[in-house]
Image (cartoon, rainbow, N blue to C red):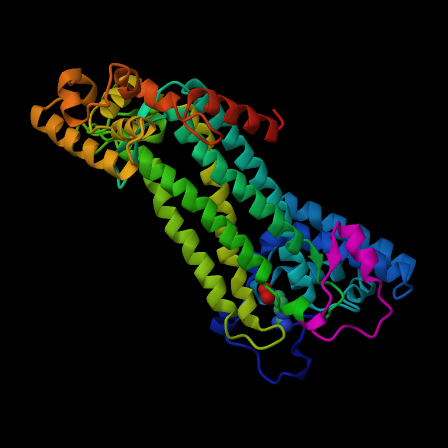
């Protein structure tokens, strides 16, 4: 084959223009799949030989040739050619140059359609495993921080208004739960990623006596795509993965938003280590939380990739269409962005400096224990709705006076309800309020401790 002649050009009368060649080529980005492409080809060739479709000698030659190509690629010695379109044809051409006719036999009983679907699945499977590992590393860092702050009181918010006092450790453990669900989703997604499309050939299957089970086993797939048309055209697994990634980024974006707020001097709850922040070129006083801001920003881009993949698939007739070549760049960028974000987060959590006094005084403003007063009255027999009304009036009074609930004299409190007795003051403290929520999932320090213990066991620490 001459260099300017396409692998498939037998029936064509004129060559494609440079622009069309560039427009249709994917090698600039799909060369990233080379390792998986070779892995798939090795398994395919072994099966072809085992089934007597190619000779044993051809298989050995293919194996040696592919191993050499893998080394060339790893050592950056491989010359990629746009004229050869994609990773598959680049490798096949090189193989043929190296080993002659045996190389030309590799593509027997196979098409690039089932080949590329296999490559992406292998790539995504490896990516999922790495991402789960990175999430666990971040959970580890979260647990360390949470453990240090089981007794640190902060205001819990609803509507971003002070609601009730909570343990900062409890707040952090909310993110542990989100990440735990993320791992569950990825694990589930992995099962559908881990199915073998190879054998579907172009779309209808192949007339050669192939053994798909053997290829699945060699490549570590859990099962085989059961319909050849679906096998080459399905990208559900890529969309599912993207949706998982969007949710992970959404969780990290929410945490970022909180870090950004808490770092603002009006909150002053935390400081981030300098290595995650930058200054301003004009305002000398500034320390900007660039990293969490970028996590928030990059979440938009990951969501965009999910929409791109959904849109890519929405009107495709069966089976393979070239549209599918567009699945790779969003997927690659999703994997890269997500992995970097997780790595940076695990490190950033070790550099969170907490200001417990500021958190505490913030919890003291805003009547965070008002619900506790209402619950106190309810436990004394007053219906909750009436108790709510009594406390609302008490809060209004306290607000006019400019004092907190536990600063009001007992005699004054009793004007709002004679049921209030001196034991109320224990209830109205931040620790009293927090400590009373001691059921599973509550913010009482003993429960936060238990949650951390359970989390450690789940992480197998
Ligand atoms: N580069 C192509 C892709 O990414 C490989 C499959 C090409 N198949 C074809 N029938 N042209 O989808």
**Left-right relation of 389 to 181:** left
Q: Looking at the image, which is closer to me, 390 or 448?
A: 390
Q: Quadrant of the C terminus?
A: top right
> Can residue 151 be seen from the camera position used here?
yes
Front in this rendered view, residue 379 or 229: 379
Residue at 36%, 23% (x, y): give it. 434
Q: How many marks?
A: 0
Q: Residue 247, relative to residue 164: is it above or below?
A: below
- The residue under the point 62% across, 46% down is 187
Q: Is residue 179 magenta?
A: no
The residue range painted magenta reads: 202-229
Q: Quadrant of the N terminus?
A: bottom right
- State the image coordinates of residue 145 (x, y, percent, origin top left): 44, 23
Instruction: Report the residue at 32% width, 33% height from top.
Output: 259
**Which residue is the extreme one toward the left?**
400
Query: Which residue is pictured at 67% across the width and 47% down the height?
Result: 72
**Vertical placement of residue 177 versus 197, above or below:** above
Quadrant field for ligand 1:
bottom right
226 inside magenta stretch: yes
Q: Is residue 111 left or right of residue 370?
A: right
Q: Nearer the viewer, residue 306 or 50?
A: 306
396 vs 83, nearest the viewer:
396
Location of residue 318 in the rendering, given as x and y in whole percent from the top left corner: 61, 76
Q: Is residue 341 left or right of residue 192?
A: left
In the picture shown, does residue 333 fall above or below 22? above
x then y, percent, for residue 374: 27, 30
Q: Is residue 28 visible?
A: no
Q: Quadrant of residue 355?
A: top left
Residue 133 percent location from the top left of the image: 58, 36
């Amino acid at each position: 084959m001459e260099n300017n002649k396409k692998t498939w050009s037998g029936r064509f009368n004129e060559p494609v223009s440079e622009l069309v060649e560039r427009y249709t080529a994917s090698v600039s980005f799909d060369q990233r799949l080379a390792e998986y492409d070779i892995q798939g080809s090795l398994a395919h060739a072994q099966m072809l030989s085992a089934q007597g479709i190619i000779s044993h000698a051809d298989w050995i030659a293919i194996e040696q040739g592919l191993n050499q190509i893998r080394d060339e690629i790893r050592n950056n010695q491989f010359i990629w050619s746009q004229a050869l379109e994609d990773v598959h044809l680049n490798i096949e051409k090189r193989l043929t140059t190296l080993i002659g006719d045996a190389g030309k036999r590799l593509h027997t009983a196979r098409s690039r359609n089932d080949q590329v679907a296999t490559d992406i699945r292998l790539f995504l499977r490896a990516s999922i495993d790495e991402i789960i590992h990175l999430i666990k590393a971040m959970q580890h860092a979260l647990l360390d921080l949470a453990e240090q702050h089981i007794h640190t009181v902060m205001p819990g918010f609803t509507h971003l208004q002070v609601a009730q006092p909570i343990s900062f450790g409890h707040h952090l453990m909310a993110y542990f739960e989100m990440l735990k669900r993320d791992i569950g989703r990825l694990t589930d997604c992995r099962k559908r990623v881990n199915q073998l499309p190879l054998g579907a050939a172009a779309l209808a299957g192949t007339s050669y006596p192939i053994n798909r089970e053997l290829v699945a086993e060699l490549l570590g797939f859990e099962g085989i795509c059961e319909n050849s048309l679906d096998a080459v055209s399905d990208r559900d697994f890529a969309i599912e993965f993207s949706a998982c990634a969007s949710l992970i980024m959404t969780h990290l974006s929410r945490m970022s938003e909180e870090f950004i707020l808490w770092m603002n001097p009006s909150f002053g709850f935390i400081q981030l280590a300098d290595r995650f922040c930058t200054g301003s070129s004009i305002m000398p006083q500034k320390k900007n939380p660039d990293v969490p801001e970028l996590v928030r920003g990059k979440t938009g881009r990951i969501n965009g990739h999910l929409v791109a993949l959904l849109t890519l698939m929405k009107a495709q007739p069966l089976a393979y269409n070239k549209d599918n070549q567009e699945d790779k760049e969003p997927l690659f960028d999703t994997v890269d962005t997500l992995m970097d974000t997780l790595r940076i987060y695990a490190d950033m959590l070790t550099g969170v400096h907490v200001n417990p006094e500021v958190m505490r005084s913030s919890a003291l403003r805003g009547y965070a224990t008002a619900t506790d007063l209402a619950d106190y009255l309810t436990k004394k027999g007053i219906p909750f709705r009436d108790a709510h009304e009594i406390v609302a009036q008490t809060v209004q009074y306290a607000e006019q006076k400019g004092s907190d609930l536990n600063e009001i004299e007992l005699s004054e409190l009793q004007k709002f309800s004679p049921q209030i007795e001196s034991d109320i003051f224990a209830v109205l403290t931040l620790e009293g309020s927090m400590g009373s929520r001691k059921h599973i999932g509550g913010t009482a320090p003993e429960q936060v401790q238990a949650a951390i213990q359970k989390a450690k066991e789940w992480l197998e620490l």
